[in-house]
């Protein structure tokens, strides 16, 4: 039995070795790929590392690029050097720990075997896995090498480098002599350009202001200084690559210059915003309402915050972060905040409605949402009303818009309605003289309305004969109203004293009956007590 099992065991072992232990076709092909191009990290490490050696192995370097077969060795060497110079000139330092070492790497966006080290700052430079499973710098990148090189370095700087004598190639403090000389020349030229641009911008902006009735001339003139520095730093940033500093030096300088550009841009934006807000303040001063006067500072704050946010986004983009992703994230975050703070958004929209509809202005006496007082401030979220108890009530703008607003401050006339109680024993002729006298007082008073008032004997009350005084004061505020009312009432008292009319006060007459015996008769107690 044991002899019969031996052939079967050998067959099983052969089957396992053939189908399980033997390497697959892909594994065999992957093992045949050279180590220098087996993964994106290996290809980039070879491409950059070999060019840092004292004696460059150009055959190894060019093997990491996807050239056409008919490309000459000189052209291959030129393209490899150009791409390395582009990365160095733009300060694009490749961190190898961020480059995938997986030979089977797939780009998450394109779903292709490709890798782009700098998708924002240099999207034209990317690696791709070929049919032979080797990772190389793509053919499209190779074809764009000349264009990228010309866009990075100025043509006259390239010409000048070819004409420099060998003596300027000497090293000093880690840099060549011509690099230090070029840096000094670039700094001097930038300073001269700043002075000339400052004069130019000041004249241009002042002329621009004079065309608009000389509005904000001082503010626009002050914007000339940041405008000149903005152009100067941009010029310095643009031509920094021509100095051919090492990649780490360019990276640090580019970050510093980008931050400086952003700071100067915010400085210039603040000056420009101040000029625009000065124009808005002049326009607001000509309107009847003063609500928009208080919204100009709000607009100034919003514009300043917006300029800082834009500067932050531009800095993030210059450092390789996707501004689209940031804006999309801010948009989603803003949507979530808006959904969570609908009342706040309604109040903000309410403030815009108040500015557009102008139901009141600051200083008006209003009755809104059950609160009465003087409007102190119209803000982005609420309207502040100082009550007559000297307390401050913040009414949300959404309630102000949706409630009935009784604006006492917009009254052209302030009504007075009063009943003057005269004694019953007053002579009718004196009553008529009194009524006519009150009418004369109104007609002679410049602070009262003369085209409409009513002074009449109106009714017989329990203890007086009542004269209706219905008139209006033409005064701008409550203080003036009280003052004029005081004067008018005093003149009525003087008139009554002059005519001989007395005012009544509540009285009651009690009549007593006497019976035949002379005793007082009182009504019987209904309860029989």
Image (spheres, helix red, strand yellow):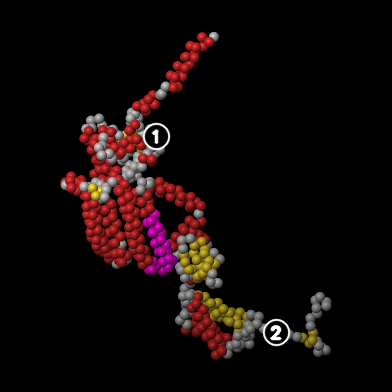
Separation of residues labelled 1 and 2 (CA atoms)? 115 Å
Helix or strand or loop: what does disc 1 sit on? loop
* Vertical side of 472 occupied by 357: above or below: above
Helix or strand or loop: what does disc 2 sit on? loop
Decide whether the magenta segment is chiefly helix, strand or loop. Answer: helix
Q: Is residue 112 left or right of residue 373?
A: left
Whether residues under marks 1 and 2 lie with C-beta atoms below 8 angstroms apart, the answer is no
* Vertical side of 21 occupied by 527: above or below: below
Highlighted magenta segment, given as a residue range: 283-310
Residue plotted at (49% across, 57% down): 344
The foreground one among 129 and 363 is 129
Residue 504 in view (yes/no)? yes
Residue 456 at x, y = what percent? Answer: 56, 80
Q: Residues within 10 Å of mark 1 (few under 14, many from 20)?
A: few
Q: Residues within 10 Å of mark 2 (few under 14, many from 20)?
A: few
Q: Which residue is mark 2?
A: 509
Residue 29 at x, y = what percent? Answer: 36, 26
Q: Which residue is mark 1?
A: 102
Quarter of the N terminus within the rendering? top right
- Which of discs 1 and 2 lies nearer the camera? The answer is 1
Residue plotted at (28% across, 46% down): 246
Residue 111 at x, y = what percent? Answer: 39, 35
Q: Earlier in the sequence, mark 1 or mark 2?
A: 1
Residue plotted at (79% across, 83% down): 522
Magenta stretch holds residue 373? no
Q: Is residue 427 left or right of residue 339?
A: right
């Amino acid at each position: 039995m044991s002899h019969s099992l031996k052939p079967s065991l050998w067959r099983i072992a052969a089957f396992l070795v053939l189908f399980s232990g033997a390497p697959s076709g892909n594994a065999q092909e992957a093992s045949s790929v050279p180590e220098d191009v087996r993964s994106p990290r290996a290809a980039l490490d070879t491409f950059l590392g070999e060019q840092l050696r004292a004696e460059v192995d150009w055959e190894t370097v060019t093997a990491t690029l996807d050239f056409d077969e008919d490309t000459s060795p000189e052209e291959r060497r030129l393209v490899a050097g150009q791409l390395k110079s582009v990365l160095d000139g733009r300060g694009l330092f490749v961190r190898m720990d961020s480059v995938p070492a997986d030979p089977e790497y797939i780009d998450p966006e394109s779903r292709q075997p490709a890798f782009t080290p700098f998708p924002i700052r240099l999207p034209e430079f990317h690696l791709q896995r070929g049919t032979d499973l080797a990772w190389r710098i793509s053919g499209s990148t190779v074809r764009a090498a000349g264009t990228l090189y010309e866009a990075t370095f100025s043509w006259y700087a390239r010409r000048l480098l070819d004409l420099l004598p060998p003596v300027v190639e000497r090293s000093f403090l880690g840099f060549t002599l011509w690099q230090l000389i070029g840096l000094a020349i670039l700094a001097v030229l930038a300073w001269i350009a700043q002075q000339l641009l400052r004069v130019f911008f000041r004249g241009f902006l002042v002329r621009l202001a004079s065309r608009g009735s000389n509005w904000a001339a001082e503010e626009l003139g002050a914007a000339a200084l940041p405008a000149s520095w903005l152009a100067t730093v941009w010029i310095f940033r643009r031509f920094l690559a021509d100095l051919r500093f090492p990649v780490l030096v360019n990276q640090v300088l580019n970050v510093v210059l980008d931050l400086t550009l952003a700071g100067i841009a915010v400085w210039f934006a603040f000056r420009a915003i101040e000029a625009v807000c000065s124009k808005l303040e002049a326009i607001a001063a000509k309107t009847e309402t003063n609500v928009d006067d208080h919204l100009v500072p709000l607009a100034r704050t919003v514009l300043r915050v917006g300029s800082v946010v834009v500067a932050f986004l531009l800095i993030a983009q210059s450092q390789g972060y996707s501004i689209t992703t940031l804006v999309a994230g801010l948009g989603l975050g803003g949507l979530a905040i808006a959904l969570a703070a609908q009342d706040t958004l309604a109040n903000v929209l309410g403030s815009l409605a108040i500015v557009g509809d102008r139901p009141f202005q600051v200083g008006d006496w209003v009755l809104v949402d059950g609160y009465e007082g003087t409007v102190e401030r119209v803000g982005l979220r609420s309207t502040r009303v100082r009550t007559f108890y000297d307390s401050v009530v913040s009414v949300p703008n959404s309630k102000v818009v949706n409630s009935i607003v009784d604006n006492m401050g917009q009254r052209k006339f302030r009504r007075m309605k009063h009943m003057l109680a005269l004694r019953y024993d007053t002579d009718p002729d004196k009553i008529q003289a009194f009524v006519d006298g009150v009418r004369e007082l109104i007609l002679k008073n410049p602070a009262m309305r003369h085209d409409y008032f009513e002074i009449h004997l109106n009714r017989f009350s329990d203890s007086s004969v009542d004269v209706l005084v219905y008139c209006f004061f033409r005064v701008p505020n409550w203080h003036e109203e009280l003052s004029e009312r005081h004067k008018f009432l005093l003149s009525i008292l003087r008139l009554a004293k002059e005519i001989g009319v007395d005012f009544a006060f509540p009285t009651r007459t009690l009549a007593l009956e006497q019976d035949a015996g002379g005793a007082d008769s009182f009504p019987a107690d209904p309860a029989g007590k």
